[in-house]
């Protein structure tokens, strides 16, 4: 009988959060349509004041740019390992050892279908529109993701935190 390896692999992916195609299309479509409508209004019914015309064109262009950024940012899969939460390309969201608590309550400042992670030490600001953001000691994950996948990550993180604090023997 073969001897089993008792030490778990720290890079083994425990849970994945995959953005849902319908949510990505809807979020990008709504943002892109806003940009197109604003530019259409500026082209067909231009305001008399040039400041308002510039405002409409700039806001429409910004909305189109934002839709493109949202489409790109929400194309990645998030992975939770025993040591870190990361994008499948390798960009780090946070380390599990740095997690203070996880908040998925109704009153938390979090994205739709998502959750908020409070860290012990602050990290740099990063924003992946529609998928996750990090500012200081907070990391919020959600938006175009599935509520069930987010809930699985929250539960697993809570188990890892309880295990780290000696809650399980």
Image (cartoon, grey):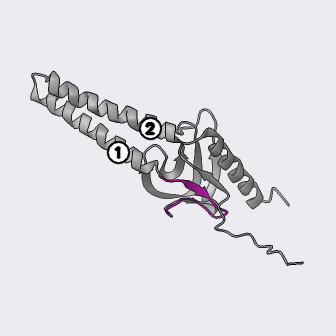
What residue do we see at 58% from left, 37% from top? 113
Of 115 and 165, nearer the camera is: 115
Residue 128 position in % (x across, y down) = 44, 49
Q: Residue furthest bottom?
A: 2
The circle on residue 163 is none
Instruction: Assign the N terminus to one quadrant of the image.
Output: bottom right
Count of numbered labels shown in the rendering: 2
Residue at image mark 2: 25
Residue 158 position in % (x across, y down) = 71, 50
Which SS class for mark 1? helix
Q: Is residue 79 magenta?
A: yes
Residue at image mark 1: 68
Q: Is residue 154 above or below residue 44?
A: below
The quarter holding residue 4 reads bottom right
What residue do we see at 50% from left, 37% from top? 23
The quarter holding residue 84 reads bottom right
- Measure the alpha-carbon separation of dots 2 and 1: 11 Å
**Left or right relative to 76: residue 119:** right
Which SS class for mark 2? helix
Residue 122 position in % (x across, y down) = 51, 57
What residue do we see at 43% from left, 54% from top? 125
Q: Which residues are magenta?
A: 76-89
Instruction: Assign the C terminus to one quadrant of the image.
Output: bottom right
């Amino acid at each position: 009988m073969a001897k089993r390896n008792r030490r778990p692999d720290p890079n083994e992916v425990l849970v994945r959060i995959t953005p849902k195609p319908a949510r990505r299309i809807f979020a990008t479509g709504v943002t892109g349509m806003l940009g197109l409508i604003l530019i259409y209004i500026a082209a067909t019914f231009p305001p008399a004041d040039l400041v308002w015309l510039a405002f409409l064109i700039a806001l429409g262009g910004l909305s189109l740019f934002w839709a493109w950024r949202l489409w790109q940012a929400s194309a990645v899969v998030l992975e939770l390992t025993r040591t870190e939460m990361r994008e499948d390309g390798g960009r780090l969201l946070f380390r599990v050892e740095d997690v203070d608590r996880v908040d998925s309550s109704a009153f938390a400042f979090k994205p739709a279908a998502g959750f908020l992670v409070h860290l012990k030490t602050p990290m740099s600001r990063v924003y992946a529109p529609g998928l996750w953001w990090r500012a200081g000691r907070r990391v919020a994950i959600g938006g175009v993701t599935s509520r069930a996948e987010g809930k699985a990550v929250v539960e697993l993180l809570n188990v890892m935190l309880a295990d780290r604090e000696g809650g399980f023997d």
